[in-house]
Image: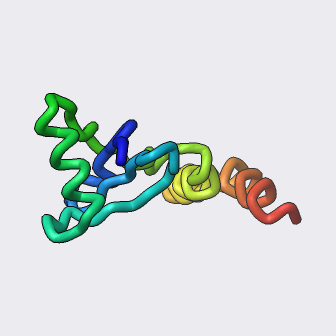
Amino acid sequence: MTVQSAQWTDESRTMIAATIDDVEGMFVPDDPANRFRQQIAAWEAEGNVIADPPPPPDPFGADNARAQQKRKMDAAAAEGDFETAFSILTDLTGV
């Protein structure tokens, strides 16, 4: 078995996403009894390092654009700018 890459899946560091024998997307638990984890441990002993986990998704990213618009609408309404709030509501609902 040949480990090509390994990366922790998240900050809990309980699961490793690995490429082993050209098979990508293997999820290996951090369990010393697991045969794939044993292979990754041997790979580490050769001087390789399991990569840090990817950063968490941006809570204000594109997938959250509607939530951002709603916060802007709420802020405009709280400030008494109902014209802006209504405009944003119209954009959000398509009405």
Give how far across and how far down residue 61 sits, in percent. 53, 44
For the point 26% across and 64% down, which residue is it? 35
Q: Residue at x 35, y 42 (%)?
A: 3
Residue 30 falls in image quadrant: bottom left
Colouring scheme applied when the structure was drawn: rainbow
Q: Give the side of residue 91 with respect to residue 40, left or right.
A: right
The quarter in which the C terminus is drawn is bottom right
Is residue 78 or residue 23 the one in the foreground?
23
Task: Name above or below for residue 69 compared with residue 51.
Answer: below
Q: Residue at x 56, y 58 (%)?
A: 67
Of all residues, the one furthest to the top in this rendering is 47
Q: Is residue 79 visible?
A: no
Q: Is residue 75 above or below residue 53?
A: below
Looking at this view, name the residue that lies furthest to the right. Answer: 95
Is any atom of residue 49 visible in this view?
Answer: yes
Seen in the picture, residue 66 relative to 29 is either above or below; the reply is above
Q: In terms of depth relative to the viewer, which is nearer, 49 or 11?
A: 49
Q: Is residue 24 left or right of residue 18?
A: right
Q: Position of residue 5 (x, y in %)?
A: 37, 38
Q: Determine the residue positioned at 24% across, 51% down.
A: 39
